[in-house]
Image (cartoon, helix red, strand yellow):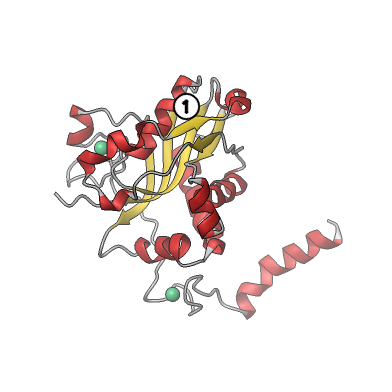
Amino acid sequence: MDVQGKIRWGVRRFVPWVYPALCELCGGQAPCAEHPWMVCMEPRCGRCAQRLPEGIARGQSCADCVTNSSGLAQVLALGDYGARSDWKSWILALKHGGRPDLSQPLGALLAERLKVSGNLGSQFVLVPVPLYFWRRLHRGYDQAALLARAVSQGAGAPWSQALYRRRSTVAQGSLHSRGRAPNVSEAFGLHPEAIDRVQGRNVYLVDDVYTSGATLRACARILRAGGARKVGALVLARAVRFA
Ligand SMILES: [Zn+2]
Ligand SMILES: [Zn+2]
């Protein structure tokens, strides 16, 4: 073990004893009451990550996905995104609170979720859902790309910014779910030089929230047209349906 390795080993071994882990969001002792890390594997639909009603086994399809294909081979989510969801404060801080550093712990959790799913393989690649240029400029960082990089480090899988956004789309939250699809269908493109990164591969899109799924489906269509074998998605949280 070299010197750096010894230091790293020492830090990992002894620091948690001297300095207890702190909440990444507020700095209180972790897990703090306000911002718990919850990664319980609730039964969720294998196609859209919606929470399943009682009695339906994990990984089965929900009623929506039985009738309408989600267009995605699989969606993995850590939790729900809704008024009473603990994930909301983490995601809002990451997206709008100027906390790009949260992509590290959140990405590490996504990496664990991905490893447990058993979908990693030699033909696997992570692709972040791209942010529009101006929004990236305004925010100063691209949270999906940061997440994808953190997942890549945690899971030991490659990632590629293979997609780009042609134009801005109206913020998803401001449209009803039915109005979303036409808005995003033409919004994405595949970088020609990235085609061999996705061709014949199992691609997992990375994003913060699965809202209506329209964005992820539009990205999946582009990736399949570019030769991806299978397209799934990995998100921090799944929006709770209001209906
Ligand atoms: Zn906290
Ligand atoms: Zn479903």
Whether residue 62 sits left or right of residue 138 in the image: it is left
Q: Residue furthest left?
A: 243
The location of residue 202, given as percent across then percent down, is: 50, 28
- The quarter in which the N terminus is drawn is bottom right
Would you place residue 137 above or below residue 60 in this image?
A: below
Q: Residue at x 23, y 32 (%)?
A: 65
Q: Residues within 10 Å of mark 1 (few under 14, many from 20)?
A: many
Ligand 2 location (quadrant): top left
Number of numbered discs overlaid on the protein picture? 1
Give left or right: position of 52 versus 172: left
Q: Residue at x 73, y 68 (%)?
A: 10
Residue situated in front as seen by the camera: 66 or 116:
66
Location of residue 218 by image quarter: top left
Respond yes or no on whether mark 1 lies under 8 Å from ligand 2. no
Left or right placement of residue 46 versus residue 232 in this view: left
- The answer to which image quadrant residue 40 occupies is bottom left
- Classify mark 1: helix, strand or loop: helix
Q: Amino acid at mark 1?
A: Leu
Identify residue for label 1.
Answer: 223
Relative vertical location of residue 197 with respect to residue 242 in this rendering, above or below: above
Give the percent coordinates (x, y) of residue 185.
35, 32
